[in-house]
Each structure stands twice: as structure tokens, then as C-alpha cells.
Image (cartoon, rainbow, N blue to C red):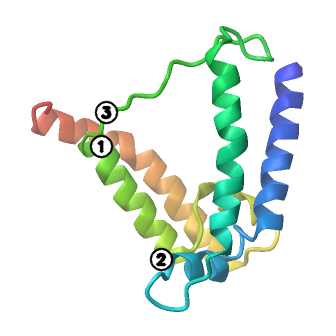
Amino acid sequence: MLQLVIAFVSGGLFGAGLFISGMTDTAKVQGWLDVFGAWDPTLAFVMGGAMIPMAIAWLVARRRTMSLSGNPMPPKPSKEIDSKLILGSILFGAGWGLVGLCPGPSIASLSYGGPGLYVFLAAMITGMWLSPRVRARLDRAVPAE
């Protein structure tokens, strides 16, 4: 039950933060990404404001073995920069730039996003479903780096 409460409160805070900060406004996000045009630097403050509490959370988490809900802490992410990371970053960035949304803000926009949002969500879910299948095929076809 505690896990559900933590998930509900965390998700609510995350969604509210995305909405208040403007991350669910596709025009604002695309303005942030348009560095050679009508650049809107305001999302830099949102991202900077998100990095500070996250850095503190990583410092606290580094000393813990169990989460607040009683689950073991996950292992540290890999620092390796490989083809999976590069390709995933390119695809994520291309989708973000074309649509002005990424997974978190798209879900936060569900109640008012309109038909374009539902097309994006369908494409995102399809991509999430296809990704491990394509990756498995590529891993079989091309030997590891």
C-alpha cells in the first residue's frame, strides 16, 4: 500500500510540475529547441531546477540500501556510451523536437491534449513495444561491440 501512495504522490507532483513549468506546452518546448530561431530559454530554468533536487537525491540514495517503500535500491546506471545509448538519444531527441513532447509530458497532457496527442501516444507505445524486438534482432545480426 505504501508503494501505491508513494507512486501516486510522486506522479501527481511530477505531472503538476510539468504542467506548471510549461513542459506540456508543445510550442514552448519547440521554442526551447529552436536555438537558431526564436529561442525560448525559459525551460533551461526548469531543467536546472530539476537537476538540483535530483543531485541531492542521488547523494542521499548513494548511502541507502533500501528505498522508503522497503525495496532494494536499484544498481547505478552504466556510464558506458555505446550505440544503444546514442541511437536511443537520437530517436528520443528527434521525437521530442518534431512533436514537442516526451513521455512524461505526453501522459500529463492526456486530459487536454487533443487528437495529435493520441497519435503521439500510439506511436510512443508502438515504439516501446517494438524496441526490444528490434534490438534483439540487431544483437543477433551484429556481434557485440
Rendered view: 69 above or below 36: above
Residue 26's spot in the image, x, y percent? 64, 77
User: Regarding mark 3 in the picture, which secondary structure is present there?
Assistant: loop
Nearer to us: label 3 or label 2: 3
Residue type for callout 1: Lys
Nearer to us: label 3 or label 1: 3
Rendered view: 135 above or below 102: above
User: Regarding mark 2 in the picture, which secondary structure is present there?
Assistant: helix
Q: Nearer the viewer, residue 3 or 132?
A: 3
Q: Which residue is mark 1?
A: 84
Residue type for callout 3: Glu
- Residue at the spot 67% in from the left edge and 21% down from the top edge: 61
10 Å crowding of disc 2: few (<14), some (14-19), many (20+): few
Residue type for callout 2: Leu
Q: Quadrant of residue 114?
A: bottom right
Quarter containing the C terminus: top left
Q: Nearer the viewer, residue 27 or 141?
A: 27
Quarter containing the N terminus: top right
How far apart in space, not on screen, are marks 2 and 1 (Cα)? 21 Å
Q: Which residue is mark 3?
A: 80
Q: Earlier in the sequence, mark 3 or mark 2?
A: 3
Left or right: 144 as drawn, with respect to 35 = left
- Residue at the spot 65% in from the left edge and 11% down from the top edge: 72
Rendered view: 78 above or below 97: above
How far apart in space, not on screen, are marks 3 and 2 (Cα)? 28 Å
Left or right: 96 as drawn, with respect to 117 = left
Q: Which residue is mark 2?
A: 98
10 Å crowding of disc 1: few (<14), some (14-19), many (20+): few
Residue 110 visible here: no
Q: Quadrant of residue 132?
A: top left
Q: Nearer the viewer, residue 104 or 48?
A: 48
Residue 75's spot in the image, x, y percent? 51, 18
